[in-house]
Amino acid sequence: ENCIINTGAIIEHDCEIKNHTHISTGARLTGGVYVGEGVLIGAGAVILPKVKIGEKSILGAGSIVLNNVPAYTIAAGNPAKIIKEINLA
């Protein structure tokens, strides 16, 4: 519900995408990826198999995500690393 999947994004088999998620242009989710609610996946990001992206997280454009990303964090780079925690208070 209420998701945006932009042009050229690829979502492979057995992925689970929760509500209010934005998957930007050219992003690639390989098999078995879990994407929590309210996530933003930047343009051209690649998420490797069976990785879990926690709710309200942001993945930078062009990132290569090898490992799980905790909820409420910003991750970017190749390989993606957590660069900031999101404080909603």
Image: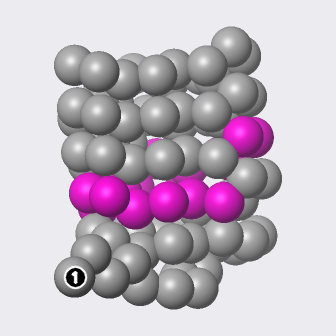
Left or right, residue 65 beside residue 11: right
Expressed as whole percent of the image width and height from the top left, the position of residue 23 reads 53, 33
Quadrant location, the C terminus: bottom left
Name the kind of residue labelled 1 in the image.
Ala
Q: Residue at x 48, y 47 (%)?
A: 40
* Dot 1: element: loop
Viewer-nearest residue: 60 or 48: 60
Q: Is residue 60 above or below residue 74?
A: above
Q: Count how many numbered circles sit on residues in the image.
A: 1
Residue 50 visible to the viewer:
no
Quadrant location, the N terminus: top left
Q: Residue at x 41, y 84 (%)?
A: 85
Q: Which residue is mark 1?
A: 89
Q: Is residue 72 above or below residue 45?
A: below
Residue 78 visible to the viewer:
yes
Residue at the top extreme, as displayed: 7
Is 46 magenta? The answer is: yes
Where are the magenta residues, as a range? 43-60
Viewer-nearest residue: 50 or 78: 78
Left or right, residue 23 beside residue 46: left
Q: Residue at x 36, y 23 (%)?
A: 3
Quarter location, residue 26: top right
Within-10-Å neighbours for mark 1: few <14, some 14–19, many 20+: few
